[in-house]
Structures are given as C-alpha cells and as structure tokens.
Amino acid sequence: MLPTLLLAFGLMLPILFNLWSIRHAFKHDFPSEKEKKIWIRLATFLPVVGGLVYLLWGRPRALPPGTAGSRLSRRDDA
C-alpha cells in the first residue's frame, strides 16, 4: 500500500505544479500580452518542462495583477 501511495504522490506532484504555473501566469500581468500567452501555452503544451521553465524565468517577470493596465494608461497620459 505504501509504495502505491508514494507512486501516486510522485505522479501527482508534477501535475499540480504545472496547474499552479498555468494559474499563476493567467492571473498575473506581464510586460506584454504576447508574453503572457506564450507562458500559458508553454506550460500547457509542455507540462513538466514548461512548468519548470515558467518557475525559473516566467514567474520573476510576472507583474502583480492589475499593474499592466495602469502602466499603459500612464504612458498614454504622457
């Protein structure tokens, strides 16, 4: 029974991590809308690798939710 539980946990961990990556990219803003779409597609179509790449390079580039729109409006005012 214990080996079965360990196997199940070992298989679920990458899936949960990848779902978190997709959700995080979807909820946060990025410098461009194109970049946001690329990160979501990468995590969707390359599940384990895409999630790991997002964690290392995409997550630090993510902006807090709602900041991209305010940044664009400030650029329009100038």
Image: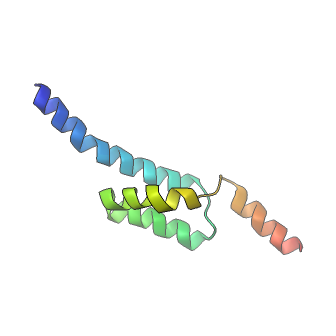
Image location of residue 68, percent across then percent down:
70, 62
Query: In percent of the image, x 45 and y 55: which residue is there?
Result: 55
Position of 19 compared to 76: left or right? left
Image location of residue 20, percent across then percent down:
43, 47
Position of 28 compared to 55: left or right? right
Looking at the rendering, in which quadrant would you find the N terminus? Answer: top left
Looking at the rendering, in which quadrant would you find the C terminus? Answer: bottom right
Q: How is the image coloured?
A: rainbow
Query: In percent of the image, x 40 and y 61: which residue is there?
Result: 53
| Quarter of the rendering containing residue 75 | bottom right
Query: In percent of the image, x 24 and y 36: which residue is there?
Result: 9
Residue farthest to the right, as pictured:
78
Position of 13 compared to 32: left or right? left
Residue farthest to the top, as pictured:
1
Residue farthest to the front, as pictured:
56
When the figure is inspected, residue 15 is found, relative to residue 37, above or below; the finding is above
Query: In percent of the image, x 76 and y 64: which residue is there?
Result: 71
Total number of numbered discs in the rendering: 0
Image location of residue 28, percent across then percent down:
59, 55
When the figure is inspected, residue 32 is found, relative to residue 13, above or below; the finding is below
Position of 48 compared to 31: left or right? left
Image location of residue 6, percent across then percent down:
18, 33
